[in-house]
Structure formats: C-alpha cells, structure tokens
Image (tube, helix red, strand yellow):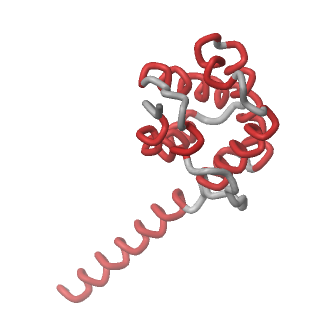
Amino acid sequence: MVATMKKLIVLIALLLSACANQFHTESVYQSMGGYQKVEEVVNNYIVEIEKDHVIFEYFKESDVERFRAKLTEHICFHTGGPCEYTGDDMERVHDGMNMTESDFNRSVDLLINAMDQADIPHRTRNRVLAIFAPMRKEMIYRP
C-alpha cells in the first residue's frame, strides 16, 4: 500500500511538472508574436520617443535607422528570438546621456505604450520588462 502510494505521488508530481513546463516552453519572443511584433514595438517606441519632448532630447542626435535596427536586435535576442545582438553594451550606448532615474522610468512608460499599441498581452509585457529591468543600472546616470 505504501509503495503504491509513493508511486502515485511520483506520477502526480511528474504530471504536474509536465503541465507546468508546458506553460513555460514558449519564449517571450514567441509570446510577443515573433519578429514582426518586435519590429512593431520598436517602431511604436520610436514614435513615442518622437512625441515626448523630454525623452526625445536624449535621442535627438541619434541615427534613427541604426537605433531601430539595434533595438530590434536587442529585444529579439534578449527575449529568446533567433537574432544576434551586434550592438554595443548598454553602458557604452548610454555613456554621456546622463539619463536620470525619472527619465528612465518615463522611457519605460513609452515602451509600455509601444507594446500596448502592438497588442502585446499584459503578461507578456511584464515578462519583457522583467528581462530588461536589470539593465537599468547600466543606463542611468552615465555622464
């Protein structure tokens, strides 16, 4: 009886584990909707930046097409897509910007708006933000 109960518990644990893994096998990239959705988010984000007079100041001298290409690679790569990120690290990209924490938060709001406009589900947006949140320290207060 005890051996049968142990086997049943192991079987239930394996089934629960398999079910749990089923929900986590899809990458964030796939949850977003793939490359087209990443491009859409980046394009929306660029428009959001252009409309925001505070954040635009950080990017006004940027090469927009390079920014678009590298940010698309960056998001694709870090969310589990098939891209390779060929740009600089975040510290180097943000050197000289001296972005404040408040402005960083404002730019995150713009990214959330961009994902919302692209119909990225709320849960997936949170997963995207969780991936990039640790990079915050590499982006702010970089004189």
- Going 65% across and 27% down the picture, which residue do you hit? 116
Give coordinates of residue 40: x percent, y percent: 77, 35
- Going 47% across and 31% down the picture, which residue do you hit? 143
Confirm whether residue 30 shows in the render: no
- Going 65% across and 49% down the picture, which residue do you hit? 74
Give coordinates of residue 101: x percent, y percent: 42, 25
| Above or below 31: residue 84 | below
- Going 29% across and 75% down the picture, which residue do you hit? 9
Give coordinates of residue 65: x percent, y percent: 82, 36
Q: Report the number of discs.
A: 0
Q: Quadrant of residue 5?
A: bottom left
Position of residue 139 in the picture relative to residue 8 (left or right): right
Q: Quadrant of residue 3?
A: bottom left
Q: Pick the residue in front: 56 or 73.
A: 56
| Above or below 101: residue 9 | below
| Above or below 52: residue 64 | below
Position of residue 56 in the picture relative to residue 135 (left or right): right
Quadrant of the frame with the N terminus: bottom left
| Above or below 75: residue 18 | below
